[in-house]
Image (cartoon, helix red, strand yellow):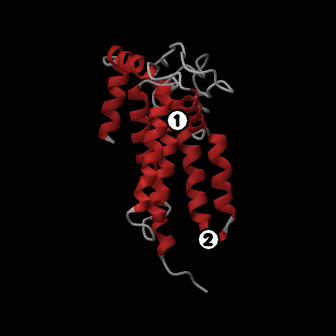
Amino acid sequence: MSIFLICTLIAVSQSTLESERQFMTSVQKSAGNPSIDYAIWLLTESGNVFVMLPFSILLLIIRKTRRIGMILLILLVLSSILTGYIKCGVDRDRPFLDWIGSELPFEVEPDSFSLFCEGRSWTAGFPSGHAARSAMFAFVMVYVLSEKFPRGAHLIWIYPILMSFSRIYVLQHYPLDVIGGFILGILLAGYVSKRLKLDEIFLPRKI
């Protein structure tokens, strides 16, 4: 929690904004390869609430994975509300830089729910909702798969790391935005998983 609070204070102070802009400018120099640009665009769109929602509902419907689906659904709702309100409080603008890469099939989707800021629904940037959701998803799925795949399960963490980078690459967020979102996602997932006893999925089922 303290790390997230530190990130929030830095975001409010705007003290790292210039160095973050320079970093994003250097990242943008690698844009322009259609294959890479499209792959990163698809990756960043996978963090949309409306992409993760059907997957969570499917897990909720299946009896064996019902608790997992319920936890993911609750996390989606909580993270959407919480990131929305934090964005209003921090009031940190998105990069607003011009995309110089390949023409994408559709416009890049900003964070789905930053709707609590009057007049600034899509312009507030800290923390990143996409980074938070992907980190929550990874936390839950790594825990669920860790018993059967104790080593391989941790490879799932590659997903939120790449998601966070993709939000920077497509100019939707500054680096601090995705770092804050990533940390917030882990904190939320840990809290909700503990409260709803995610560990009980490993207990023998009653016949």
- Residue 138 x, y percent position in the rendering: 47, 51
For the residue marked with disc 2, what is the amino acid? Lys
Residue at 33 percent of width and 26 percent of height: 9
Residue at 58 percent of width and 64 percent of height: 67
Question: What residue is disc 1 on?
Answer: 129
For the residue marked with disc 1, what is the amino acid? Gly
Query: Callout 1: few (<14), some (14-19), or many (20+) C-alpha neighbours within 10 Å?
Result: many
- Tell me the number on the disc at residue 64: 2
Label count reads 2
Instruction: Pick the residue in front: 46 or 67.
Output: 46
- Residue 2 x, y percent position in the rendering: 30, 39
The local secondary structure at tag 1 comes to helix
Asked if the residue under mark 1 is in contact with the one under mark 2, i.e. CB atoms within 8 Å, the reply is no
- Residue 112 x, y percent position in the rendering: 62, 32
Instruction: Pick the residue in front: 148 or 180.
Output: 148
Query: Callout 2: few (<14), some (14-19), or many (20+) C-alpha neighbours within 10 Å?
Result: few
